[in-house]
């Protein structure tokens, strides 16, 4: 902690709630806050002037502050912090809080509130934000007495970051923040009813190990929990020890290097063909830090129907919620995997891997390069130029799915996206948050033309702080994913999916950002390279892409692997001689 | 009355009445969060009774709801996750003692009053208020008893009625005593 010496000097000193608040944040090791001032929170903003240990980033919309906090948290593993005023300031954080709740992101949102005696009186800029966010926060607080403030801040951070992480909101009435109390930061938290299970039950772990050791066609189904638990190394070790093929969810991307022959890429609605097929044929499914979300399972009854299932998760309510599992293990993923590694042995999966490789050859991810610019090519090129050494923050839609498919993921915390809630407008502010937290790898924001406009105001914040970010807008003039559904399932009746867009390059330049436009596929590589090399500030590239293009493979909602649709584009035969005929294991079902 | 519903893995399961006893810390908003969990799952709360326990800082909430077993298991797990929750017990599958208190204001005439008093005696109910045109009875008992007394008094005309909802505690010796 930067000024712990001066912090100690303030122990026991009388000070206002606003000062206690800022000192408490310093105690928590907070380095950056994303916020927007207002009447109810003006006292706290005054306290920030003198205590400059913490960097405050002024955003241009409170929603941007919450997504920035999410991006920061996902990129660094540290909790994101938001500071907003009452009323509309607080309600503008609702979407971001709901997003953090769905994706289990540790953020703490501090909102100003009208004085205690005015609550419930329809006061100016009053909103019952505690009531509004109750169902979308892990927990929330209204501070009624300044003497509770330090304890509440400590509890808020503890709750947000422990167990299954999630958002916590603390409402700060203006009069309470003006009251005085002695500053005493508690040494520990006292929450006897909240004790997350960290160590997995050894008996269950041994049971899982026995099941794994008998598997002939195992699959590791890996989710965001592995990254939250900082367990990518253990997961990789387990996969390689077992020689078990790995598929990840959207949030699991990066936990296992996709360059490894065991990697099957992403599974689910827009996952790879072979990962979905492998899951449907496997005999043991090892779910690690994943929640059997409907985008992954499709029709729940048919998901991995042949397999015995092991589920490792820190949240007991996530286990057997959608899909009943055979060996549940409640605990921190990293701790459980470490123990599990002691009890498993290498498996004989040679034939299984060969079969999967055959499937990979028959149904690879593919797109045809042509005259028109395609998103797949832009993302594929980005992956090659960076070698996976980047922090990529996507928005929501077709580009998000193509990024998941065509970028070669290598590192944990290199893929940041809005998964559970699917919030458009997430990418730009979240990438901004990530850029404040990560200086080691380039931060790249990728949005569609629709999503970019939902929080484009944050361009001002990005330029103000001269963040060396790359901002890509893949512009097809459509709300692509919705258009795809309307094309495939609604007889191509396009209803309100076409967008009249501004000149994005002019818009970026109006904010003072260096900007390029790419219309020719031949320009993709040189312009991307130029952007990656530019380090004096943000750089914006608009890619004008094909208007209508569909994401494949696709398993339509609630359907099974049998209904999976692959891209109509043919598989290019390998260069040179025809592929050698290989013996493919015939799998007996049932 | 039970209705077949689809649940996890598509196995059919029937909705039935559940009595859930929750020990919760007496903090601001704790009850709202619990009620919200049921609302979010679309589960109606048939009755809800809450009061202090032997520990002043802890309250006991007794909720009677209707739903299929699998979803009730999810609700119970979610209730356990809440920071303020001390303990959750689904009493439905255990032996438990349950009671409810009811106050009923009945319309009376001189001729009907004796019969009403007779019914009150049979149910061991007490008269707690009287007026020329009304009579208020207080009765306690199991939910079945309370429902029976209401049925018996309905023909006379019930002016107002207030029920506490079920309170319940697990039996120490599981099974008949």
Image (cartoon, coloured by chain):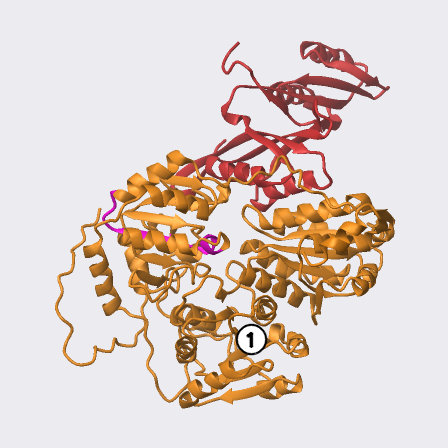
Chain colours: A orange, B red
Query: Along the horizontal axis of the image, is A544 left or right of A187?
Result: left
Residue A464 visible within the image: yes
Q: Nearer the viewer, residue A529 or A524?
A: A529
The span picked out in magenta is A214-227
Q: Is residue B90 above or below residue A521?
A: above
- Residue A509 included in the magenta stretch of the image: no
Quadrant holding the N terminus of chain A: bottom right
Q: At numbered mark 1, what does the secondary structure look like: helix, strand or loop?
A: helix
Can I make out residue A145 in this image? no
Q: Position of residue A492 (x, y in %)?
A: 43, 75
Categorize mark 1 by other alpha carbons within 10 Å: few (<14), some (14-19), many (20+). many
In front of the other: A307 or B153 = A307
Total marks in image: 1
Q: Chain of mark 1?
A: A
Residue at (48%, 45%) from the top-left corner?
A332
Residue at (33, 67) in percent of width and height: A259
Left or right: where A400 falls relative to A242: right
**Looking at the image, residue B24 lies above or below residue A267:** above
| Residue extending furthest toward the front | A5
Report x, y in % for residue A287: 39, 49
Q: Residue placed at 57% from the left, 37% from the top?
A: B80
Judge left or right: residue A188 versus residue A576: right
Point out residue A519 in the picture as x, y percentages from the top left corner: 46, 89
Please state which of residues A472 and B98 is positioned toward the viewer in this rendering.
A472
The residue identified by callout 1 is A450
Classify A500 as above or below A409. Answer: below
Nearer-the-camera pick, A464 or A24: A24
Residue A549 locus on image (x, y percent): 41, 77
């Amino acid at each position: 902690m930067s000024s712990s010496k001066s912090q100690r000097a303030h122990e026991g000193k009388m000070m206002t709630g606003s000062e206690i608040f800022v000192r408490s944040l310093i105690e928590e090791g907070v380095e950056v806050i994303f916020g927007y001032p207002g009447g109810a929170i003006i006292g706290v903003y005054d306290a920030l002037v003198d205590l400059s240990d913490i960097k405050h980033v002024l955003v241009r919309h409170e929603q941007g502050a919450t997504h920035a906090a999410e991006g920061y948290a996902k990129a660094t593993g540290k909790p994101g912090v938001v500071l907003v005023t009452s009323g509309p300031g607080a309600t503008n954080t609702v979407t971001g809080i709901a997003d953090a709740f769905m994706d289990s992101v540790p953020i703490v949102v501090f909102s100003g509130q009208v004085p205690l005696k005015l609550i419930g009186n329809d006061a100016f800029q009053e909103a019952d934000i505690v009531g509004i966010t109750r169902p979308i926060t892990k927990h929330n607080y209204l501070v009624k007495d300044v003497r509770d403030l330090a304890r509440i801040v400590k509890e808020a951070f503890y709750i947000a970051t422990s167990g299954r992480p999630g958002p916590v909101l603390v409402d700060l009435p203006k009069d309470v923040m003006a009251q005085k109390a002695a500053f005493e930061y508690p040494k520990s938290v006292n929450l006897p009813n909240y004790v997350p299970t960290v160590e997995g039950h050894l008996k269950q772990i041994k049971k899982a190990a026995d099941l794994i050791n008998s598997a002939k066609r195992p699959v590791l189904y890996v989710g965001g929990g592995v990254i939250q638990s900082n367990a990518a190394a253990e997961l990789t070790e387990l996969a390689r020890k077992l020689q078990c093929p790995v598929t990840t969810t959207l949030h699991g991307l990066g936990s296992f290097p996709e360059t490894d022959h065991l990697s099957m890429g992403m599974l689910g609605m827009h996952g790879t063909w072979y990962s979905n097929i492998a899951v449907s044929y496997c005999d043991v499914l090892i779910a690690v830090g994943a929640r059997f979300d409907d985008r992954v399972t499709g029709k729940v009854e048919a998901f991995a129907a042949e397999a015995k299932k092991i589920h490792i998760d820190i949240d007991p309510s996530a286990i057997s919620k959608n899909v009943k599992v055979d060996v549940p293990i409640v605990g921190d993923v990293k701790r459980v995997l470490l123990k599990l590694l002691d009890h498993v042995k290498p498996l004989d999966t040679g034939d299984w891997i060969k079969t999967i490789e055959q499937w990979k050859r028959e149904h690879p991810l593919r797109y045809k390069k042509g005259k028109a610019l395609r998103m797949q090519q832009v993302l594929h090129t980005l992956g090659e130029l960076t070698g996976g050494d980047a922090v990529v923050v996507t928005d929501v839609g077709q580009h998000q799915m193509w990024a998941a498919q065509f970028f070669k993921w290598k590192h944990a915390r290199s893929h940041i996206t809005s998964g559970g809630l699917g919030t458009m407008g997430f990418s730009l502010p979240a990438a901004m948050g990530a850029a404040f937290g990560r200086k080691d790898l380039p931060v790249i924001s990728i949005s569609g033309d629709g999503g970019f406009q939902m929080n484009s105001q944050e361009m001002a914040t990005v330029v103000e702080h001269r963040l060396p970010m790359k901002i890509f807008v893949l512009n097809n003039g459509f709300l692509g994913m919705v258009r795809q559904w309307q094309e495939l399932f609604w007889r191509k009746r396009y209803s309100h999916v076409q967008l009249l867009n501004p000149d994005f390059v002019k818009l970026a330049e109006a904010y003072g950002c260096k900007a390029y436009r790419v219309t020719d596929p031949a320009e993709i590589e040189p312009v991307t390279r130029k952007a990656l090399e530019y380090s004096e500030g943000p750089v914006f590239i608009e890619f004008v892409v094909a208007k209508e293009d569909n994401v494949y493979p696709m398993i339509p909602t609630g359907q099974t692997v049998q209904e999976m649709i692959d891209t109509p584009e043919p598989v290019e035969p390998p260069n040179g001689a025809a592929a050698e005929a290989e013996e493919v294991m015939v799998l007996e079902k049932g | 009355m039970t209705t077949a519903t689809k649940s996890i893995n598509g196995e059919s399961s029937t909705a039935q009445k559940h009595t859930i006893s929750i020990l919760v810390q007496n903090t601001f908003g704790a009850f709202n969060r619990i009620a919200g969990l049921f609302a979010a799952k679309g589960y109606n709360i048939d009755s809800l009774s809450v009061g202090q326990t032997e520990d002043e800082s802890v309250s006991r909430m007794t909720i009677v709801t209707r739903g299929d077993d699998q979803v009730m298991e999810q609700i119970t797990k979610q209730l356990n996750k809440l920071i303020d929750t001390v303990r959750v017990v689904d009493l439905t599958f255990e032996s438990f003692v349950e009671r409810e208190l009811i106050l009923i204001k009945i319309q009376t005439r001189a001729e009907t009053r004796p019969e009403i008093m007779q019914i009150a005696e049979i149910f061991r109910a007490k008269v707690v208020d009287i007026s020329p045109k009304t009579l208020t009875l207080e009765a306690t008992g199991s939910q079945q008893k309370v429902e029976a007394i209401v049925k018996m008094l309905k023909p006379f005309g019930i002016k107002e009625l207030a029920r506490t909802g079920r309170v319940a505690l697990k039996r120490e010796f599981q099974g008949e005593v």
